[in-house]
Structures are given as structure tokens and as C-alpha cells.
Image (cartoon, rainbow, N blue to C red):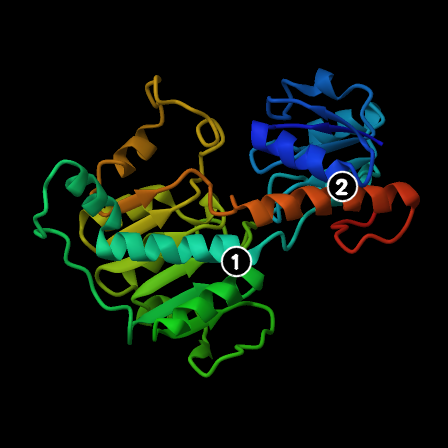
């Protein structure tokens, strides 16, 4: 199968080439994003492999179908950037990687909690400058705190289990049934979770129903100085609302691995450029905000699983077999 892999970085090439030795697909790596401006690049492809900041709306999918593309392979779990109805209409299969490594994202989430709480990033910078003062580095015990987990899929479950190890009580919300798996994990409705949690961590997909679920109204119901962590999708948070929450001290700490307008920034080296996003730049001015560039997934184990599963998905489709990671049924 001729697979055109968009939004590629050197590490994508390394892991896909390594895993492709078992499949022998014809891989073409393309650095740029797939969107309406780069559609001429898809000519000759049987499948396109895309990532979180590629745009697959109706016009793009219509063009893909006209160019003979039969499959869209997401090398991630989320599919909010794909018009699924258009894919069904134009007869294009869409597959994803639902469980590349829940541990990678969950562990990064807890790392952000610890860094924000104990100011590890600030302490590192201070000591490098010979400053050993403890002023401004006060944290709190995680033991006996209440952590709210929004979304109890694989990543949410692993995050919840890790936090119980710190002695946290976990309030867990998911619209679908789930097994708590631990006495300290308590199923909760969303309103109660927002109201009673000291730490809120988001682990749900971005859908029309979850977009801006963290907004002015939701923040107003939370505890004062709540900690909010988002390692899922940027659009879950209304950025302007959290900026207001930070300004009035309603939000005590904010950890973001994703940002709702990240597509023109994340995964790129902009150190010699002026960031044009004024909202993002405002976030960077807060001392209690920690931002990483969509790296929570980025472990050796996860990258190996992403490449292998993506290529296996396409191999299964090529053979005409049933694919467990197929997201849509063609009309």
C-alpha cells in the first residue's frame, strides 16, 4: 500500500521505518500538514497517515476520495479533526490508535501536577543560578487531596490509579459505564467533581458536547485555587475563561500539554520567532502556569505502538479483514 505520512518529524520516520520492516508498505514522508492548501501532495496515495493538527474537513475528504485515497489512518486516538460523516459519505475508511500507551500520558499528567505543586521547574532554574532560597517554593501534600478525573478511558483509569498511590481520593466522571477498580476511586457526576476537587485532570475526547467544558460557569463552581491539568485536547478549555480565573486567583495552578489554537505552534521550533498568538503569550506570563508542547504521548513505548498499530490497521484494511480500530462504517 502507498501510504503518505503527513506532519512528519525525524522521530516519526525512525519509528515507522523500524516497524514497517514487518509490513513492507510503500511509505512517503511529508513534513507539512495535510489541509486544503497541500492537497496536490496526495496524488498517488492509497492511504494518508495524519496527526492531531492535520485538517480533514469535508472539502479535503472530497478531494481525497477523488484522488483515489481509500483510507485515513490517524496515528493518535482523537479524531476531532476528521469530518466522519464526510468520510462515510465518500467511502473512506478512518482508523485510529486508541491505546498506544496510556501510561505515557498518565505519567506526564502526574509529572505536571508534581511540578506545579512543588515548583520543580522553578527550583531547577534557581539552583542553576546559585539561588538556594526556598521563598516562593511552598507546595502541598497530595495525600488526602481530592483529584477529579474527567474521562475514565484507559488514560483516565491509569491516572486515577497513580493518584490513589499518593493517597488521593479520586472523583471519576465518564458518561459511559466504567469500573472504578479501587476503593479510593468514586464515580461522580460532573458538577460534584468540579465543586469538590482540589485537582481536575481532563482525559476525554474533544466533541461538540465537551468543547469548552472548562468555561466561566464551570470555573465559578470550583474550589478557590483549584489546579487544572489538560493533557487531552486543547479545545476542552476556554482559554480566555481560564485566564480570567488565573487573574482573580480562582485557578491556583494550570498545566497544559495542549492548547486550542496549537496547530501553528506546537511541534515546531519557534525560538527565533515572535509568537503571534496574544492569548497564548498571555498564558506564558503567569508564574503558576506550566505548558508543554503536546509531548505527553512522547515515549519510546508509545511511538513504537503508534507506528506498529497504524501500519497493522492499514494492513488489515488492505486484506479486507475486519479492523477493530475502524471508526466509521461506509454508506
Give residue 284's quadrant in the image: top left
Residue 133 at least partly seen: yes
Residue that badge 1 annotates: 103
131 or 52, nearer to the observer: 131
Look at 87% across and 54% down and name the residue there: 322
Question: Considering depth in this image, is 108 or 230 the residue closer to the camera?
Answer: 108
Numbered-mark total: 2
Question: On the image, numbered disc 2 is attached to which residue?
Answer: 311
Lateral position of residue 38 relative to residue 174, left or right: right
Q: Are marks 2 and 1 in contact (CB under 8 Å)?
A: no
| Image coordinates for residue 186, horizontal then vertical, percent | 45, 79
Q: Could you say which disc has been placed on residue 30 in the image?
A: none
- Residue lying at 15% horizontally and 53% vertically, measured from the top left: 137
Q: CA distance from mark 2 to mark 1?
A: 22 Å
Q: Residue at x 62, y 49 (%)?
A: 77
- Is 281 located above or below residue 38 in the figure? below
Give the SS element for disc 1. Answer: helix
Counting from the top left corner in percent of width and height, residue 105 is at: 49, 53
In-front residue for pair 138/232: 138
Quadrant in the picture for residue 229: bottom left
Q: Position of residue 205 (x, y in %)?
A: 55, 53
From this viewpoint, is residue 251 visible?
no
Q: Residue at image x 32%, y 52%?
A: 216
Amino acid at each position: 500500500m502507498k501510504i503518505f505520512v503527513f506532519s512528519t518529524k525525524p522521530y516519526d520516520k525512525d519509528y515507522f521505518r523500524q516497524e514497517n520492516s514487518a509490513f513492507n508498505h510503500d511509505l512517503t514522508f511529508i513534513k507539512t500538514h495535510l489541509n486544503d492548501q497541500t492537497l496536490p501532495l496526495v496524488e498517488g496515495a492509497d492511504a494518508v497517515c495524519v496527526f492531531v493538527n492535520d485538517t480533514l474537513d469535508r472539502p479535503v475528504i472530497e478531494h481525497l476520495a477523488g484522488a483515489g485515497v481509500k483510507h485515513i489512518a490517524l496515528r493518535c486516538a482523537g479524531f476531532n479533526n476528521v469530518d466522519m460523516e464526510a468520510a462515510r459519505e465518500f467511502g473512506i475508511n478512518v482508523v485510529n490508535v486508541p491505546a498506544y500507551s496510556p501510561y505515557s500520558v498518565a505519567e506526564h499528567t502526574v509529572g505536571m501536577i508534581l511540578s506545579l505543586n512543588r515548583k520543580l521547574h522553578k527550583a531547577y532554574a534557581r539552583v542553576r543560578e546559585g539561588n538556594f532560597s526556598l521563598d516562593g517554593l511552598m507546595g502541598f501534600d497530595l495525600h488526602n487531596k481530592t483529584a477529579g478525573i474527567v474521562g475514565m478511558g484507559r488514560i483516565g483509569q491509569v491516572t486515577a490509579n497513580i493518584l490513589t498511590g499518593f493517597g488521593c481520593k479520586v472523583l471519576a466522571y465518564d458518561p459511559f459505564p466504567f469500573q472504578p477498580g479501587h476503593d479510593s476511586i468514586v464515580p461522580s457526576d460532573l458538577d460534584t467533581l468540579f465543586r469538590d476537587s482540589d485537582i481536575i485532570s481532563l482525559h476525554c475526547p474533544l466533541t461538540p458536547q465537551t468543547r469548552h467544558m472548562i468555561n466561566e460557569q464551570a470555573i465559578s463552581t470550583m474550589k478557590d485555587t483549584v489546579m487544572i491539568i489538560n493533557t487531552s485536547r486543547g479545545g476542552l478549555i476556554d482559554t480566555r475563561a481560564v485566564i480570567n480565573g488565573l487573574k482573580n486567583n480562582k485557578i491556583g495552578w494550570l498545566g497544559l500539554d495542549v492548547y486550542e489554537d496549537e496547530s501553528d505552534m506546537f511541534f515546531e521550533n519557534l525560538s527565533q520567532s515572535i509568537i503571534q498568538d496574544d492569548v497564548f503569550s498571555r498564558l506564558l506570563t503567569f508564574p503558576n502556569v506550566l505548558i508543554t508542547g503536546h509531548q505527553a504521548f512522547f515515549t519510546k513505548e508509545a511511538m513504537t505502538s503508534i507506528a506498529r498499530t497504524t501500519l497493522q490497521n492499514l494492513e488489515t484494511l488492505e486484506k479486507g479483514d475486519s479492523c477493530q480500530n475502524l471508526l466509521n462504517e461506509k454508506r
